[in-house]
Image (cartoon, helix red, strand yellow):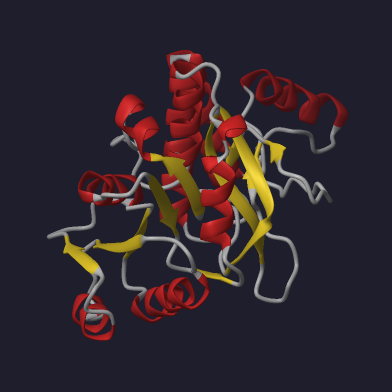
Amino acid sequence: MDVSIIFVNYNTCKLTIESIASVYKYTKKINFEIIVVDNDSMDNSVNEIKNKYPDVNVIKNSKNIGFGQANNKGMEIAKGNYYFLLNTDTYLINNAIEIFFDFLERKENNEIAVVGGHLYKPNGDWNVSSGHFPNFKLFIKGCFWRYFYKKEFYEEEVLNPILINSEQPYAVDYVSGANFFVRSHVIKRVGGFNKRFFLYFEETELTLRIKRILQQSKVYIIPQANIVHIGQGSSLDSIKSLKFKLQYLKSRSLYFKYQNGYCACIMVYIKGLIRIFFKR
């Protein structure tokens, strides 16, 4: 099996079916399987997906276990040499999977562990495809800079697209979790997503761990692989729901714990609470 394509579905039946349709439409010359892990959806997703695509392997969880753990369950049964973790609110617009596969099969690219494509919004504008690892030193600097100079700085580390107008593949810190194409042996070596992350920052922490354990490993964007992502990168200010703001803050603080230790985690969490409740 060349590639295992894994979706995590949570009450997104229509989007999931449309995304699966785009995989079948555009994916050529690749031996692949599709796995859908359902997080206890209430919209009849499991039956609808099974009826529409009987060859798709659907796993139904008894509760919502989060994005990362659901992907882990899919990877546990996956047979592919590569795992392609694809969001349900995405759809392919070219043969992106073959492009990823062919790129990683080249001998000179053996050190590249993870790739992603160029993501676009439905209107054709750029979407968040990759990012820089959050930087605690810049977080601290941003906190003080904001108060002394009364201007915005790199405090919240908002995810912005890295707009590199290149036709050649280029290295990044991490790719968006909306299209995370990874070698299966890398996951077997370093483990899957950290179970403590329910939502947000899962791919950031996993990529950091890959680079720490497999120190020569690299992460690349392949511009020729084009995918539409209906959603977009999240930041504390862009999230409207208080519930999801708090979840984002929890995951962000947890990421800093793994990167910089407990003190950094606590500082980021307290500063985030101040920003959420006092707009400071």
Residue 43: x %, y % from top left:
26, 80
Which residue occupies 46% across, 55% down? 242
Q: Is residue 48 visible?
A: yes
Q: Is residue 77 above or below residue 146?
A: below
Observer-nearest of 185 and 128: 185
The x and y percentages for residue 110 are 54, 30
The one of 108 and 234 positioned closer to us in this rendering: 108
Quadrant containing the C terminus is: top right
Residue 266 seen anywhere in this rendered image of the structure = no
Q: Is residue 94 left or right of residue 75?
A: right
- Nearer to me, 200 or 248: 200
Q: What residue is rendered at 49% in x and 76% in y?
A: 22
132 vs 105, left or right, is: right
Above-or-below relation of 204 to 214:
below
Q: Quadrant of residue 274?
A: top right
Tag count in the figure?
0
With respect to residue 21, does 222 lie above or below? above
Residue 213: x percent and y percent? 43, 17
Q: Residue at x 34, y 78 (%)?
A: 13
Q: Is residue 152 left or right of residue 37?
A: right
Residue displayed at 62% across by 21% down:
136
* Percent x, y of residue 27: 49, 68
Farthest-out residue, left: 62
